[in-house]
Image: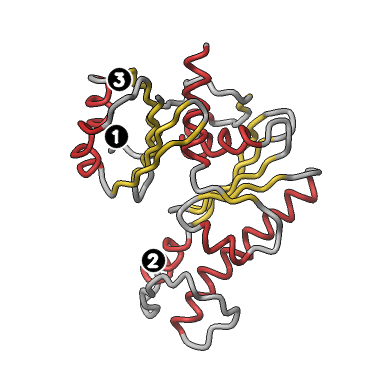
Amino acid sequence: MNFVLDFGNTRIKTGLFEGNNLVETCVFASEKELLKQIDSFSNIKNCLIGSVTKDHVQTSKQLALKFNTRVFESTTPIPLVNLYKSALTLGSDRIAASVGAWSLYPNKNVLTIDAGTCIKYNFVNEKNEYLGGAISPGIPMRLKAMHQFTQALPLVELDKNYDKLTGQSTAESLLSGALVAAACEADAMIDRYMEQHENLQVVITGGDADYLCKQLKNRFFANQNILLQGLNTILNFNLEK
């Protein structure tokens, strides 16, 4: 069994795989919470940790005592040609999500949209080359930034049921600017990629993917576990080398 862990900016998500099949997922609020459960993990042979923080250090040490454990780094081999110019600064979440989407749609143009703390757009072409993409503020970050960098605008609680284009109060206007505008941004990005790349496959994932999926006019495939799938694909790729 393979065990993969995604340490994101707001949560930790884990996946247990048998071959390429995802058997179980868990979500933890912190490494401390995860470490309390670490002794319950069993029937595991290999582990891969992907992290955009430094909160994985103790977990990697504890897992290494029990299983064959690796931490995904910029030098870790991947089953794609990485053409990103600053590969050393490329986040593990971006490349893992791209590998996960690519594993479902090899030899195709694939745009992966990961709507999390930031909204990440990552593109793999039909030659199986990772080219890069874009990073923009995530939905909660937009609301916090408008409050933090102004004197008058309030901090509005995120409401994923909000879908009105025209806000009729300051709170609604902020929600429209954060939520509806984020969906419009994503649709526009998809349109741009479609203009440049034929037969584009769009894959959406991340904590706020549920909202985007309700708003987008373009066709897409949604998979909340695409990043875990990518980490498992990378792990298997390295085990086979």
Closest to the camera, between mark 1 and mark 3, is: 3
| Labels 1 and 3: the sequence-earlier one | 1
Instruction: Work out whether residue 91 can be spotted.
Output: no
Estimate the x, y position of residue 84 in percent, counting from the top left: 60, 31
Q: What kind of element bears circle 2?
A: helix
What residue type is disc 3 on?
Phe
Residues 48 and 38: in front is: 38
* Residue 17 rendering spot, x and y as whole percentages: 44, 31
The residue under the point 53% across, 64% down is 211
Residue behind mark 3:
67
- Residue 26 image-quadrant placement: top left
How far across and how far down the image is residue 39, in percent?
A: 20, 31
Q: In this orientation, which residue lies closer to the viewer: 34 or 93? A: 34
Residue type at tag 1: His
As drawn, 105 above or below 206: above
Q: Are marks 1 and 3 in contact (CB under 8 Å)?
A: no
Q: Which residue is mark 2?
A: 144
Of label 2 and label 1, which has the lower sequence position? 1
State the quadrant of the N terminus.
top left
Position of 223 compared to 5: left or right? right
* First reached walking from the N terminus: tag 3 or tag 2: 3
Residue beneath disc 1 = 56
Report the Cα–Cα distance between label 3 and label 2.
40 Å
**Which residue is farthest top?**
241
Mark on residue 179?
none
